[in-house]
Amino acid sequence: MVFAAGHPIQDETGAQAAMTVEPQQASTIAKDRVIALISGGGSAILPALTSAIALADKAAVNSHLLSAGPDITQMNLIRQSRSRLKGVRLMRLAAPTPLTSYILSDAIGSGLTVPSRTFALTNAVCHSSSHGLRCAS
């Protein structure tokens, strides 16, 4: 399957794609193989939202951050913190199925951004407070 989605701001098309991908990955078995091609902008597309944030709110935060100027690593960590698929979660969802990812970056020189186990949205928001967001207490 091929999905297109909004970039750099998440949209309903991407959310619908995530709702299709998620149950498919969860239903794979060990003898299957998952091959994922994630194109440039992958941190913005496929917004598998957590219950803590609505799509419109996530898009508004991303729009604000894009205009405020954080680097791509900060953007990726914030996006990953409120996704059910990003930051190795797609692989975990598909387990024990082998997953091979081909990732094409549109951010020259940036590596993959994988959140630490202790990463939380409040850390990302507080870290990004210099970009105009206030830390939640």
Image: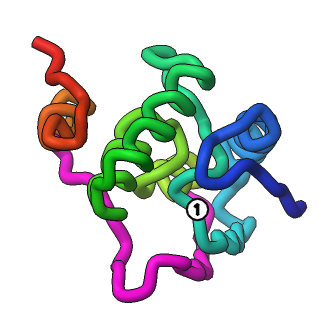
Residue 80 visible? The answer is no
Give the prevailing secondary structure in the magenta stretch.
loop
Q: Residue at x 35, y 39 (%)?
A: 81
Quarter-of-image position of residue 31 = bottom right
Q: Nearer the viewer, residue 34 or 66?
A: 66
Start and end of the magenta stretch? 95-119
Q: Nearer the viewer, residue 48 or 7?
A: 7
Q: Nearer the viewer, residue 95 or 72?
A: 72
Q: Amino acid at mark 1?
A: Gly
- The x and y percentages for residue 16 are 80, 35
Colouring convention used in this rendered image of the protein: rainbow
- Which quadrant is home to the C terminus? top left
Q: Residue at x 59, y 75 (%)?
A: 101
Q: Residue at x 42, y 44 (%)?
A: 79
Based on the picture, tell me whether residue 104 belongs to the magenta stretch.
Answer: yes
- The x and y percentages for residue 74 are 28, 54
* Other residues around mark 1 within 10 Å, as few (<14) / some (14–19) / many (≥20): some
Q: Is residue 135 above or below residue 121?
A: above
Count the marks: 1
- The x and y percentages for residue 110 are 35, 79
Q: Residue furthest front?
A: 67
Based on the picture, tell me whether residue 113 belongs to the magenta stretch.
Answer: yes
- Which quadrant is home to the N terminus? bottom right
Query: Mark 1 falls on what kind of element?
Result: loop
Q: Residue at x 41, y 54 (%)?
A: 87
Left of 85 or right of it: where is 31? Answer: right
Left of 20 or right of it: where is 95? Answer: left
Q: Is residue 28 above or below residue 107?
A: above
Residue 52 visible? The answer is yes
Residue at image mark 1: 42
Q: Residue furthest bottom?
A: 109
Left of 46 or right of it: where is 109? Answer: left
